[in-house]
Image: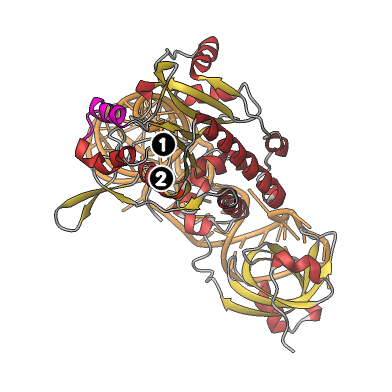
Amino acid sequence: MAVPRITIREAGSHTGQTVEIAGWLYNLRKSGKIVFPLVRDGTGIIQCVAVKSALPEAVFDELKGLTQESSLIVTGQLRAEERAPGGVELDVQGVQVVQRVPESDPYPITPKEHGVDFLMDHRHLWIRSRRQHAILRIRHEIIRAIRDYFDCNGFTLVDTPIFTPAACEGTTTLFECNYFDDEKVYLTQSGQLYNEATAMAFGKVYTFGPTFRAEKSKTRRHLTEFWMVEPEMAYATLEDVKRVAEELIVFVVRRVLENRRPELTTLERDLSKLEAIQAPFPRISYDEAVSRLQAKGSQIQWGGDFGGTDETLLSEDFDRPVMVDRYPAQVKAFYFQPDPDRPDVVLGVDVLAPEGYGEIIGGGQRIHDYDLLVKRIEEHNLPREAFDWYLDLRKYGSVPHAGFGMGVERCVAWICGLEHVRETIAFPRMLYRTTP
RNA sequence: UCCUCAGUAGCUCAAUGGUAGAGCAUUCGGCUGUUAACCGAAGGGUUGCAGGUUCGAGUCCUGCCUGAGGAGCCA
């Protein structure tokens, strides 16, 4: 009978059995007549033990001389072992080398330390490392939790286009593309305007996809290509946005704590910081935020937007995300609904992550009045024709509606406790870096 | 775009203006419980590029290139 192939994740429940593991050689320690190959298979890492006296000489010698990241299939018996990292160990009975990495061109990422530039140039290999592997697994868990939250709360996933016509927003710098012969199109920076259309068709919707910003931002919080989830709800207000944003974040953090605790431990994340993420989140107004910042020595004046340092200063006061609402109209996009009690501010809210990770959510209530929206488009010098379809939404059954966008990479950076968002995605796209 | 810092062996780094070095990686040898294993030996260099100062430049000066951190920018 053939030896069953298992994954390393399952190894703990197969002790005593002879099994096969297909993977790569993560590292090899040897001591004369005994070698300890560390094998990874994508689900985990297991230490194997090969004893010279228990194996044919050719098999032992081949294993002993095997190079880092060579692919191999090992057969052996699993055994609970306190001395082994992971608690389970495999006594090697046979080895099939699938591809041997030549010693003349060894695997470049050694178990020792490396610099950022070198690692980024070898990102296609770096993602095999324990730490990067943990981050990308947590990213997957976060994305799955986000989708589960919306799928289980009556939202319909409606994808919005990546190619968009000229003027969607008018403020940020866009990536321009040639669309066949004459036409110019731009990579999307948000699916929101389309979300407003789909929300009027489906009630509650979300879009989840990549977004692109051609800003020359060179900081630890920026990528040029990043993923955003954007819910939009018909018959909804700013208060609904705050409630959903809070529920979503609590749900996502709880799921990561439930399902990805070993990975968080690998990253040496302070779990108490994540366990503190419970409703209700503090809610403050923009006015109060400005007062708090001025008291802390910031130069910000009422009417200005927060810089990265301001966001960090604000988040210092709280052990959970803080919601800041009612921003001055001039710092927000044209489509924000003014506060009926105070026309100089709009019904928008930003959610700032704790520990200085900055804005992870931005959103609010949209203008639903046709004439007001036309006025705003004119005030922002946007081309009216490009917004004809968007204005239609205010002609045919317009209702109060609201939504927000959440940046996936900043969320991952926060939950993982990373220094830089470049490690939150397999192949980051940044200013001056587009390879691999 | 601006400011600051850096660039030396495959990698991480050292070297007062005076003979370019260490650890890791690689190769060879040793070791039956290693935990980024350890011990011994060997090979490995156009000091980012182009000029300049100097008897002499990895080191000082100028320009450029590349990268990093930050600012600005960024619903």
- Badge 2 amino acid: Met
Q: What secondary structure is marked by label 1?
A: loop
Residue A40 location in percent, x, y?
65, 65
Chain where mark 1 sits: A
A106 or A21: nearer the viewer: A21
Q: Is residue A130 left or right of residue A262?
A: left
Residue A303 visible from this viewpoint: yes
Q: Which image quadrant: the N terminus of chain A?
A: bottom right
Residue that protrudes farthest toward the left in the picture:
A182
Q: Give yes or no for contact between labels 1 and 2 (Cβ–Cβ under 8 Å).
A: yes
- Badge 1 amino acid: Val
Q: Quadrant of residue A295?
A: top right
Q: Which residues are magenta?
A: A370-383
User: For residue A374, which numbered disc appears in the image?
Assistant: none
User: For residue A200, which numbered disc appears in the image?
Assistant: 2
Residue A289 location in percent, x, y?
52, 17
Chain where mark 2 sits: A
Residue A332 location in percent, x, y?
38, 27
Residue A357 visible from this viewpoint: no
A394 or A22: nearer the viewer: A394
Q: Is residue A3 above or below residue A101?
A: below
Q: What secondary structure is marked by label 2?
A: helix
Q: Are the residues flagged by discs 1 and 2 from a single subunit?
A: yes
Q: Is residue A32 above or below residue A422?
A: below
Q: Is residue B11 left or right of residue A389?
A: right
Q: Quadrant of residue A240?
A: top right
Helix, strand or loop: magenta stretch:
helix
Residue topped by disc 1: A399
Q: Which image quadrant: the C terminus of chain A?
A: bottom left
